[in-house]
Image: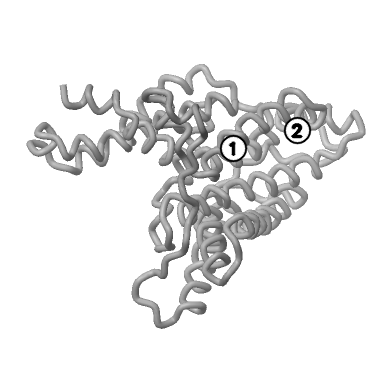
Amino acid sequence: MEIIDILFTASFWAAAIRIASPLIFATLGELICERAGVLNLGIEGIMVAGAFAGWMAVYSGTDLWTGVAIAMFVGMAFGLLHSLLTVPFGLSQHVVGLGVTLLATSSTYYAYRLALPEVTSPPKIDAFQPLEIPLLSEIPLLGGALFSQTPFTYLAFILVLVVSVVLYRTPLGLALRAAGENPAAVAAQGLPVTGLRMGAVIMGSGLMAMGGAFLTMSAFDSFFFEMVNGRGWICIALVVFGAWRPGKALMGAVLFAAFDALQIRVQQTSFGAEIPYQIFLMMPYILSILALVMVSRRAEVPAALMVPFNKGER
């Protein structure tokens, strides 16, 4: 009964939404890349770089939204590197992605030690604070969960709507999806496949970095080395879980976050005291894998995903 009671509390769902927010940013970024035909395995490192860049900018004196913009710019810079190597040069997307992750992670650690050589514990910043929306925040259960979050979380949900509209209601979105399905047809219409794919990777990487920045500027108020903790790889799975659709990917992110929030609370119950805590730590990943296996069988992968395109070749 304790577990059932947890599921019907506003604090539980508020925590789930908070945990899901960085996943939403990064999942949207990966989804845009893959919709255009490019697998971006640099996501983990880009999130680390974004987390540090945003936090360091605010610590150095900028305001929070400027820190978000700087984090996004850093992510886009790594996205530019990734796209240059994989799209026009046609190098292995797996190798380049892992290389970008290693480069972004190691350069972030180096920059941290260079900027703060004598620091033993990470300095804190004034992070985003919860912003209650009048009237809506007073709705039982849902109000406290959805409408008492930080502005950064609201931005994540707005971006789901924006990405959905762009992908499915605009000519740009149609061209982007076609670049990941049939790039030869896109080229036949006189559209630049290379430009579309590079633009998607650059913009997608910027969103990934914003997901990392959320961790240091909204979820926490400082930067530490292991804070991303595999969230990037989870986001790649969430893209598959969501069948490459923003709305379904949002549901996957919230589902995983709910599992994560639940395991933290179950450990504090009488039931959790009788079971090793490692079991609960594994729970969100095990349940997510099971859900991924069930859903991925029906998922339609973009036909040209990871397929290099050279104009003129058949």
Q: Against 45, is 177 above or below?
A: above
Q: Name the residue under label 2.
A: 176
Split into 4 quadrants, where in the image is the N terminus? top left
Q: Gap in Å between the C-alphas at discs 2 and 1? A: 14 Å
Residue 244 seen in this snapshot: no
Most foreground residue, 231 or 216: 216
Q: Residue furthest right?
A: 190
Residue 92 rendering spot, x and y as whole percentages: 63, 48
Tell me the amino acid under the disc marked 2.
Answer: Leu
Instruction: Give the number of callouts.
Output: 2
Q: Residue 190 carries which label?
A: none
Residue at 80% over, 32% down: 172
Residue at the (51%, 29%) spot, across then down: 250
Label 1 environment density (alpha carbons within 10 Å; few <14, some 14–19, many ≥20) = many
The residue wearing badge 1 is 28
Task: Quadrant for the C terminus, please.
Answer: top right
In front here: 239 or 52?
Answer: 52
Give the SS element for disc 1. helix
Please state the horizontal and vertical placement of residue 299, each as a whole percent of the image: 54, 21
- Residue for point 59% across, 40% down: 155
Q: Which of 236 and 264 is in front in this view?
A: 264
The nearer-to-camera label among 2 and 1 is 1
